[in-house]
Structure formats: C-alpha cells, structure tokens
Amino acid sequence: MYFKQFLDEHCGCASYLIASRQTREAAVVDPALDIEPYLAIAAERGFRFRYAVDTHVHADHISGARKLREATGAEICLHESARVRYALRAVKDGDELPLGQLRLRIVHTPGHRPELISVLVVNPPRSPEPSMVLTGDCLLVGDVGRPDFGGGDAEAQQRSVERLLSLPDWVAVFPGHFEGPCGKGMCGRPSTTIGFERLFNPMVRLDASAFVRALGGEVPPRPLNMVAIEATNRGDADAFWAMPTVMDSVPEVAIAHAPAYIQRERPHLLDVREPSEYSAGHIPGVALVPQAELATRLSEIPQDRPVLTVCAAGARSLRAAQFLQQMGYTNVRSLAGGTSGWAAAGLPIDKTEGAPEPTRRIVESAWTHAGVHEAATTH
Ligand SMILES: [Fe+2]
C-alpha cells in the first residue's frame, strides 16, 4: 500500500492519500482545496483516484473533494446523513470501499458532526485487522473534536470516542486536525495510537458525564468565515474565495499607541469576537462582525477608510486582518493585545449590548455583494 499524510500549516488540517501500489487505485481523505500535491503524486506514481472521502461537512476549511472529482473523476464519499446539494456516494457504518487489495471500512462516529465518519484502513493480505484509523474530528491527538457547532452532540461524541477506543492498541490514529479550532487541547503531534490515547488522552479518561460536561464548558469561537465555508462545502454557495490562504504580515497597533492612532486615522473599528464576548464589554464605537461571518458581511466593512480589527487578545483579529488583505483591503491593522489589553490599560469599555442579526438574513444578503450567484441558505 501507499500512505501519505499532508499537513496544512494554515488551517491545522490533515489530509491523507491512500493507494494500492498493486492496482494503483487511490483515495484522498479530507482533501484540501489545493489538490495539486495529490495530483503530483498520482502523476509520478501512476495512481488514479477512485474516491474523495470527506469525513464530514467541514466548517473551518473548504474541501477539495469537488475539485478532485472534476480533475480526476473520483467519487465523493460522505455519510448518508450529510446534507449537501451535489451528487455523492453515500456511505454508512460497516460499508467497505475497495481500493485494490485494501479496504476502507466506514465507521459512523457522530458527535463533532452528525454525519462524521472515521475510516479504518484494512490490508487483508497483511492482516485481517485494521492497522490504522482516520478519525476526522472525532478522536484527536490528546483531545476530541468539539461538538458545539453544526449540530454536534457531546453525548454522541462520547459514545463514538468510546467505540474507537475499543479498537486494538496497535491501531495508528490519524486525525483530521493537528491544530485549529475543531478542538481545544490538541497536543500538536500529527498522529498517535489507540493504546496511547486510551491511557493518556485527558478527555477519554473522564467518565461519560464528566466528558459531556467538559465538552459543554467554555466554547471556543466559531472559525474564521465559517458561515461561507460551510455553505460552500454543502454546495449552497461557491464562495471558494472565502478560504483564508494568504498569511502576509499585517501591521499591528500596540495598545499604548492605539488611542492616538484612532484619533489620527479615524479607522473603522471592527470587533471580530462572538456576540457574547462583545456584549460583555467592547471598545466604544467598535462594530461587531464575528469572524465566522466576516466573508458573508464584507459589505459592512468600508474599503475607503483604514480598518482596525480587534478581538480578545489579538490572534483572531490578526487572521481577520490577513483575510481582509486577501480580499483587497489595503489599509488594515490589527490591535495587538485586543480588548483585554485595552481594558487592562484603563481605557474605556462599553458594556452596551449589541444586537447581532440572525445569520440566515446575513448570508442571503451578503452573497450578492461577494459576487456569488447561488442563493445561500443555512441549515
Ligand atoms: Fe471539523
């Protein structure tokens, strides 16, 4: 067999190319939007793609499955419960996708998403037992996928993780993420084993109710451009441009210089935190567009003025500013230290509640601005 892991440093995602060296049939699991690396290996080794498997409808990055299908004729495979608007091979628990002598055995592991599948790789000439499992965002290295957006379910996640951990110790675990917003405490390693996680994953050592409580605790912010990305992955929109790809440096404004900068430049102040964070206290006069909605609400952000992005401590605002630069904004800065640094410096904080608009209306109105022709709907 042939097996290669691809790590995307921008979004913390992992994808996998699996092939039979005998028949040269290949599959990609959770393909990234840039499919060139897969095509290059296939050209070099004479592989032909049979499957583009998405473990679930992703919310943090745009899948390359449809591009791979267009380029190679690969069948898109998703769990039968996935709600998408394009043709696919619907798979269910226990199905096996033949790949030469290999078998990709589907295990339905809902929780992070209702449709999430894990893929067991079995190589019968070597062993009747699976040697590896690709776990999407179910079991992560030192963590489990968060179930708090897209219809996730912490109790289902607990049962799914327990099911994966009933695999033999030696099974190698390859997750869908090694970094990023789909988990809270990933260790950073790109792979692990069932045996190691059963012993040392802090989440799986909790009993069922503590596990569910832990997943329901502090909720990380929704990923950058999540609304546009998820709509695109469902086939509701073609906002492929919403994938943040440019990591160019963005100037930052230090808290100590911020009041003078704001007075001098009169920037559009843009808070990209979640509505609950905004309501708890924000810089006076700042407009709220949570990072998850940034791509779908670009029309609210003026292009003829400087823009100063703000978040809690300066990480999200930096990525949001990078995305605005990617979209052609030429005068964007990020507030280093964010709202917490601003408050710690004794600068004024406004606690007036915001009135965030419902996402559905935002999505429908914003595609037009972004030049996207299909109407988007949220699920
Ligand atoms: Fe995910």
Image (cartoon, grey):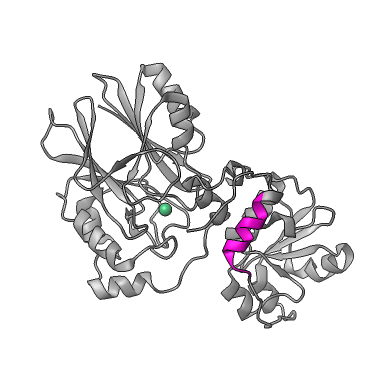
Which quadrant of the figure has residue 125? top left
| Residue 360 within the segment the image draws in magenta | yes
**156, above or below 178, in the image:** below
Q: Taking the image as drawn, is residue 316 in sight?
A: no
| Residue 64 within the segment the image draws in magenta | no
How many callouts does the rendering have?
Answer: 0
**Is 352 situated left or right of 225 in this image?**
right
**248, above or below 256, in the image:** above
Tell me the magenta residue range. 357-367
Of residues 217 and 227, which is closer to you in this image? 227
**167, above or below 361, in the image:** above
Q: List x then y, in percent, for residue 321.
A: 68, 54
Residue positioned 30% across, 65% down in the render = 203
Residue positioned 65% across, 79% down in the render = 281
Q: Taking the image as drawn, is residue 60 in sight?
A: yes
Which quadrant of the figure has residue 110? bottom left
Quadrant of the image containing the N terminus: top left
Q: List x then y, in percent, for residue 268.
A: 79, 63
Residue positioned 42% across, 18% down in the render = 43
Q: List x then y, in percent, for residue 262.
A: 83, 67
**Is 370 situated left or right of 54 in this image?**
right
Q: List x then y, in percent, for residue 307.
A: 77, 58
Which quadrant of the figure has residue 227? bottom right
